[in-house]
Image (cartoon, rainbow, N blue to C red):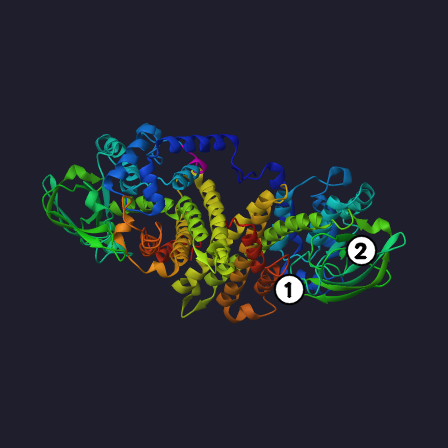
């Protein structure tokens, strides 16, 4: 058992950390957020120039051949900077779906572009009625000559506003919540009949709902075997969970540090407020939740590339549960310990608080994953 | 980074398992697993088995009879012994006074006391707390006045765990009443047979006799029983406390308790189905299992990080708080699991050799008392609030 990073991993971590430190302070983030894209194209390009967008892909597809630990290191740094770029959606989750489900032609065509950062993709898997259940799919894909015609609505596609291609799940057979009968399609962002309702999220990201009104796609848009996409969806959602856990840890570390500095600097009643025991204990609880979250991010990364199965699934569910709760706890306490200043838009701490709560709304909240864990728990 | 056990660690785990399968007495394991009463002889029997194997003094340097285990090996050992139902190690001799003697004692003290701890000849207890000195330990009042070759000790210690079995006690005593509280304390080793010592039981809320009051009335203690320097005892006391806290996270014990909880909740029935399949109860169990999973990794991560630097300091305070909260939650769920039958208090059923008819089941009787007993976890070894003060000061630098 060894928790140490190897030399290559340390270099990767330092590269990501230096980039985020250099390019992402809070004022810059506000400018990026207010731009049309909602993030920094220049930063995205730097991620690509430093090879960070290539990390999870095979060398054959222009990648670095890294795994979940390498992604963990990058995501933690992106979390620290509250970075807005669609790394999770395009590089980790979307790229992962294509890598797992795609045929050679699709992989050779799409993966090198994704790895280079020149093509952005976003998975569109949720629906208005599905909450966090990725198997609850009513969007229909019907055979239409050589291709398919898709109709339905996909919900809260983070990064979908800027995606060149969307990876849409649709039902080709089966009941609404059956895991059989779901298929994946790679759809052009400007396909006819596809409408994006774009919006900003409360934590500064951008996304969209997709309305698909008889969108025609060729047979070559089908990603993976017909009706059997659940395997790739479930597995890649697991990789994305490990990655977002790491992002959350980066944001939590910053939030805890900001709060701690504030307790040392802010004076009331003639002393730094960090001298008050009731606040000290709250701060210790935050630090302790952060340690628990760190542990689960490490554990999640250690199983994210493993064979699918109970052990992997229950650890990933446990990790997302811990991170969801820890994130919300740290967020709420951070605002509380800052007092009024913690409530203001102009203070960066407030934005960490928002991101940490919203991470609990991505890829399943702590209740969702507790239920998932119960289902996997041996009960007889 | 590879957080799975490597081959050597797996081999070590197999070795521990095979040792436990063949050497841990079945009757003792049955008592531990069932929450039944353990006798002094049970503890001593198991301690001697461990000692013969050379696995008793796991924190000691090899030259004194310890083993050179990594943090991971210690973790494996704790986890496996707990899973097999071995009694917890009574820490006062082997894990508390011994490290102090090894670090601060004279050669004579080491030669005299350490072998007797290893062999089980001496059973130590801890003379720290007093009626007026709990969390504020430095306010202790027990006096030791030097008279020629002896100290004359007067005062009272309390919460002395298993003092009724002990023949030695290590005590913090005040040797200077003029100095600041921390500067006038000394660390004395006292033979419990010395005239003037009285041990009185304190019965705890679960009806158990586990702790005692110890009274000292003109007790003559030879000066060679002083550890280190006079009035420097506070330093040694704090050193000892870091050792005490290291094991208090109790991850192995919590894992074993969680298994037991699932076993019980699998037997109990609600609405005609096993309680463990009830969504509300299953969620509670799942939540504590998840928290324990995280705490286990936190434990390993932190211990691994400080391994080069020896025993964890303030970090062990953080582990203690989380670990004891988890353990208490598990005992809470065990008590809840048996529903109304948590109320009856049939003490006879807590003996392994009980031959009567069980009121409800053979496992129910100890669960509520155990829950109440385990309230102590967040109080002893420095209350969890004191631990948070330590983390705030030492780690967060507030």
Residue occupied by mark 2: A164
Compared to residue B315, the image places residue A363 above or below, namely: below
Magenta range: B69-73
Chain identity of mark 1: A
| SS for callout 2 | loop
For the stretch drawn in magenta, the main secondary structure is helix
| Label number found at residue A203 | 1
In the foreground, A254 or A149: A149
In the foreground, B224 or B123: B123
| Label number found at residue A76 | none
Which part of the image, by quadrant, shows the N terminus of chain B?
top right
| SS for callout 1 | loop
Residue A18 in view: no
Compared to residue A357, the image places residue B230 above or below, namely: above
Could you tell me if the residues under marks 1 and 2 are in contact, i.e. CB atoms within 8 Å? no
**Residue in view at x 19 percent, y 52 percent:** B201
- Mark 1: few/some/many CA within 10 Å (<14, 14-19, 20+): some
- Say whether residue B228 is magenta: no
Compared to residue A343, the image places residue B366 above or below, namely: above
Tell whether B192 sits left or right of A123. Answer: left
Residue B183 point in image, percent of width and height: 24, 50
Q: Are marks 1 and 2 on the same chain?
A: yes
Chain identity of mark 2: A
- Say whether residue B72 is magenta: yes
In terms of image quadrants, where is residue A65?
Answer: top right
């Amino acid at each position: 058992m060894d928790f140490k990073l190897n030399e290559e991993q340390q270099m990767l971590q330092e590269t990501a950390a230096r980039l985020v430190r250099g390019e992402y302070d809070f004022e810059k983030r506000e400018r990026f957020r207010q731009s049309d894209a909602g993030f920094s194209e220049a930063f995205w390009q730097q991620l690509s120039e430093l090879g960070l967008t290539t990390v999870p892909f095979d060398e054959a597809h222009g990648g670095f051949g890294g795994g979940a630990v390498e992604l963990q290191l990058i995501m933690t740094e992106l979390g620290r900077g509250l970075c807005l770029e669609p790394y999770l959606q395009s590089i980790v989750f979307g790229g992962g779906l294509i890598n797992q489900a795609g045929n050679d032609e699709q992989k050779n065509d799409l993966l090198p572009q994704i790895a280079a950062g020149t093509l952005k993709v976003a998975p569109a898997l949720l629906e208005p009625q599905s909450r966090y259940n990725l198997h609850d799919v009513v969007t229909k894909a019907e055979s239409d000559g050589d291709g398919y015609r898709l109709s339905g609505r996909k919900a809260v596609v983070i990064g979908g506003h800027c995606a060149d291609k969307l990876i849409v799940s649709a039902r080709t057979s089966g009941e609404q919540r059956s895991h059989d009968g779901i298929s994946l399609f790679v759809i052009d962002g400007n396909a006819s009949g596809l409408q994006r309702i774009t919006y900003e999220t409360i934590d500064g990201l951008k996304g969209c709902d997709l309305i698909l009104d008889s969108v025609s796609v060729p047979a070559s848009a089908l990603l993976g075997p017909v009706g059997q996409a659940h395997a790739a969806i479930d597995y890649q959602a697991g990789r994305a969970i490990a990655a977002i856990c790491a992002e959350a840890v980066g944001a939590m570390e910053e939030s805890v540090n900001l709060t701690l500095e504030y307790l040392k600097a802010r004076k009331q009643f003639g002393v730094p407020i960090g001298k008050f025991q009731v606040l000290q204990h709250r701060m210790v609880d935050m630090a302790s939740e952060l340690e628990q979250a760190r542990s689960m991010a490490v554990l999640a990364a250690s199983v994210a590339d493993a064979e699918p199965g109970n052990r992997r699934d229950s650890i990933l569910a446990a990790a997302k549960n811990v991170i969801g709760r820890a994130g919300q706890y740290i967020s709420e306490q951070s605002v509380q310990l800052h007092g009024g200043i913690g409530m203001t838009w102009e203070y960066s701490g407030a934005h960490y608080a928002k991101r940490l709560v919203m991470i609990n709304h991505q890829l399943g909240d702590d209740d969702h994953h507790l239920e998932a864990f119960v289902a996997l728990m041996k009960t007889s | 980074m590879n957080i799975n056990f490597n081959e050597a660690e797996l081999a070590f785990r197999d070795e521990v398992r095979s040792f436990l399968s063949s050497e841990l007495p079945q009757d003792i394991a049955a008592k531990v697993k069932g929450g039944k009463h353990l006798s002094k002889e049970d503890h001593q029997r198991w301690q001697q088995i461990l000692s013969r194997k050379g696995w008793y003094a796991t924190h000691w340097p090899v030259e004194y009879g310890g083993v050179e285990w990594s943090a991971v090996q210690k973790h494996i050992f704790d986890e496996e012994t707990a899973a097999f139902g071995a009694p917890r190690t009574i820490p006062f001799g082997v894990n508390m006074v011994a490290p102090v003697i090894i670090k601060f004692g004279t050669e004579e003290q080491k030669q005299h006391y350490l072998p007797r701890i290893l062999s089980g000849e001496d059973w130590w207890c801890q003379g720290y707390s007093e009626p007026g000195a709990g969390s504020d330990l430095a306010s202790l009042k027990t006096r030791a006045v030097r008279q020629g070759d002896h100290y004359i000790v007067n005062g009272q210690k309390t919460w002395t765990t298993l003092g009724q079995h002990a023949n030695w006690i290590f005590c913090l005593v005040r040797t200077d009443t003029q100095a600041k509280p921390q500067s006038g304390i000394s660390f004395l080793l006292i033979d419990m047979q010395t005239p003037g010592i009285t041990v009185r039981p304190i019965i705890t809320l679960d009806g158990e006799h586990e702790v005692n009051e110890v009274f000292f009335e003109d007790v003559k203690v030879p000066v060679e029983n002083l550890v280190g320097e006079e009035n420097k005892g506070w330093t040694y006391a704090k050193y000892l406390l870091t050792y005490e806290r290291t094991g208090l996270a109790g991850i192995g014990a919590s894992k074993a308790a969680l298994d037991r909880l699932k076993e019980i909740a699998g037997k109990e029935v609600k609405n005609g189905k096993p309680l463990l399949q009830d969504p509300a109860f299953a969620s509670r169990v799942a939540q504590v299992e998840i928290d324990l999973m995280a705490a286990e990794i936190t434990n390993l991560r932190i211990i691994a990080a400080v391994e080069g630097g020896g025993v964890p300091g303030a970090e062990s305070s953080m582990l203690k708080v989380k670990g004891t909260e988890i353990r208490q939650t598990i005992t809470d769920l065990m008590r809840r699991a048996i529903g109304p039958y948590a109320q009856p208090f049939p003490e006879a059923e807590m003996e392994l050799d009980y031959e009567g008819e069980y009121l409800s089941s053979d496992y129910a009787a100890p669960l509520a008392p155990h829950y109440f007993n385990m309230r102590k976890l967040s109080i002893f070894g420095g209350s969890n609030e004191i631990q948070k003060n330590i983390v705030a000061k030492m780690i967060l630098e507030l």
